[in-house]
Image (cartoon, rainbow, N blue to C red):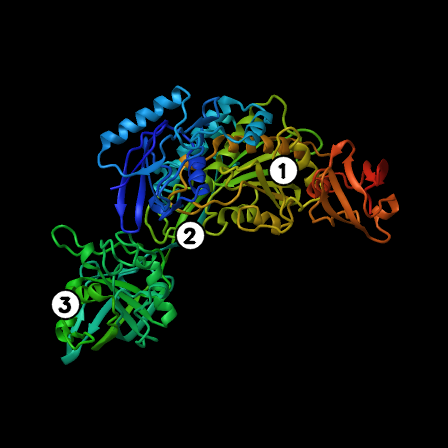
Amino acid sequence: MRVWYAFGFANLISTKRKKHGDYLVLHLTFIPNIQLKSFRNMLLAYGLQLRRPYQCQFGLKKRKFTCSVDLSLSNFIFKDAYIQRPVEEKRVAHLNFFAAQLLPTRNLVSGLILILALSLAQSCGLATGQDSAVLEPPAKQATEQEAQPKLNQAALKQVTYDIEYMSSDEMGGRQPGTPGIQLCEDYIVEEYRKAGLQPLENGTYLQELEVGQTRSVDKDATALILKGPNDTKLELDLGKDFQQLVGRKNFDLSSDLVFVGYGISAEEHNFDEYANVDVKDKVVVLIRYEPQPGDPQSVFDGEDTSRHATGRQKVSAARRAGAAGIIMVNDQSRLDEEGEDGLILPDRFGSNSLPFAQIKRDVFDKMLKASSLTSPLGKELSTVSEIEKLIDSNLEPISQPIKDWSCEFKSAFPVKKTKTNNIIGIIEGEGPNADETIVIGAHYDHLGMGAYGSRAGGRREVHNGADDNATGTAAVIELARRFSARDKKPGRRLVFVCFTAEEMGLLGAIHYCENPIYPLESTAAMMNFDMIGWLRENKLTLYNWNTSPQLDPIFEAANEGLGFDLNKPTRAFGGSDHLPFNEREVPNMFIHTGTNPVYHTPEDDFEEINCEGALRVIDYSERVVDMLAELETKPTFGTPKPFRLGVMLDDEEGGVKIEGVSEDSVAEKAGLLEGDIILDVDGEKMEKRRDLVKVLRRDAGKTVKMKLKRGDDEITLNVELKK
């Protein structure tokens, strides 16, 4: 046995041997509120790929953190590892790994002796014979952190709590119509009340709406009758003999039945149970999950469950083959300790695109007793267990029609109307623009147990939605606190909205726009926060920054001294609550720190969130709101045509080189020549093309002093940045 040892901030002594090699199991004991994102990124940076990311929870709510990764190298050294502590002033805590190496060790004692020796050697400053396993964080990162304004620790503590509480298991994923979203609603309402926000005319902070995307099985409209040889007729009892799964469309069909094994089409394993059987417009009968469960030698990810086992994949394979519906039976491994064959919940696989039901094994056994299947060698298979054993033994499909069996199959799925609420609080403005409104919003709902919208392959687990969108909701609440606490009112009215039902199709934002608290014609701007908890490399994305020519100068000015790398995509992004405002020509912005691997999975947990980064985004956004509120005139909607200098540029050491000048352009009129190197503009150094683009966008309309290197000389030109 080879055992991997490490020592330091984490208590780590363990590996387990698995089929695909050595799998590292890290038992790390962390303090609460620790940031694990940097640790994970460090693993990935050194080639350690997570074998099944959704089984490696980087954000457990307990103190112990466990992760399995595929260790493909015989020797491995962690050169550095560090994590952020959002609540403490010390922003970086090091993970000190010393003897990070696979060693041919038979017992734990010898490993511990080695670790203690290495630890002592390092503490005494002695060499270990390996590269240093502990490095300081990159100097660039330290410099960036030092340059950032110091965060308000009280605000950090409060925002951290907001995010943690709203993304806790207690909230159940915040799906509309559930007790969890009601808890979150109560929390937001109480924070609005404590901040002193003005309620709506109805005396509450709630704008009610009905949403209807939750489907259920209509028991009275559901039936499954199996017809066999010699006038055999099995009329199954719903909830006892079979379970109807939720579907997207009502159906009523009659069909022959075809057995398709586990219903798997896996080209990568040369295993396709639909390859040699016609299932077009027929109902297929299949076994749940996959062959060889628990077998470490299985091609289907060994002891782990592969993607082919999921209900979603089975539906997808059946649809591709042209099947009309699915009848599923449990595999042997899903029986309980007493051998009981349980029925799954109707919404276990979400809302299915094909008619889909589960029958009990004994029902299928009755069918097989009347009409057995036949193996390739001619053996009769008259029980589900015999079929499973044969497929598991040789991984050969035995798909075939179930002779003389057909079904009559029908069900309906009424849409359940659910009442839910946008949560709205108001701060009135004062001055000449007091009747104009700035909407500051974020959605507070999420996916609940993942019945719809989940990227986690049908796993019915709490989707906590820490980044999506407890972080954005926390931003709205925190900005409400700040503006409400001021003595002076803003120059425009501020309306704070926590939208519901965004994940169901922006329904809360659409309802607000159709029933605005104040006219959209007098709404100056809409600021939308969605996923601001994964700030990396100071990159902050501002979608729809160009929906008004007045916005971009504000975004640039607000960033003064904050050091964000503002990413401004030229193409609009529609998938969040700013879209209904955009469609009604309200200037809008979508503030975002980027997508991430845990988006719409159960792993989007609080432990993954960069709370310090989220607070920095809030600080920046406060400046933007201040400037919007004090604009003399209401921003106009419309994308301005960009200013063009009329040059071709290339990066050059010490500046930006002009590779070409367009005829009759601003550049030509100003006297710029091909070969000039732009050194600075108004004293601001131009090191990259993006530096010049930023200045041209920001200072369009102004006259600037441009310092150039022309041959061996340096000259300065006045350049009027006007079309």
Between 117 and 339, the residue placed more toward the observer is: 117
Residue 568 to residue 11: above or below? below
Between 552 and 78, the residue placed more toward the observer is: 78
Mark 3 Cα-neighbour bin, 10 Å: few <14, some 14–19, many ≥20: some
Q: Label 2 belongs to which residue?
A: 453
The image position of residue 395, as x and y in percent, is 25, 66
What separation in Å lies between label 2 and label 1 (alpha carbons)? 33 Å
Residue located 78% across and 35% down the image:
681
The image position of residue 47, as x and y in percent, is 43, 44
Element under disc 2: loop
Q: Label 3 belongs to which residue?
A: 383
Q: Label 1 belongs to which residue?
A: 437
Q: Amino acid at mark 1?
A: Thr
The image position of residue 489, as x and y in percent, is 63, 26
Contact between marks 3 and 2 (CB within 8 A): the answer is no
What separation in Å lies between label 1 and label 3 (alpha carbons)? 69 Å
Residue located 31% across and 25% down the image:
116
Q: Amino acid at mark 3?
A: Thr
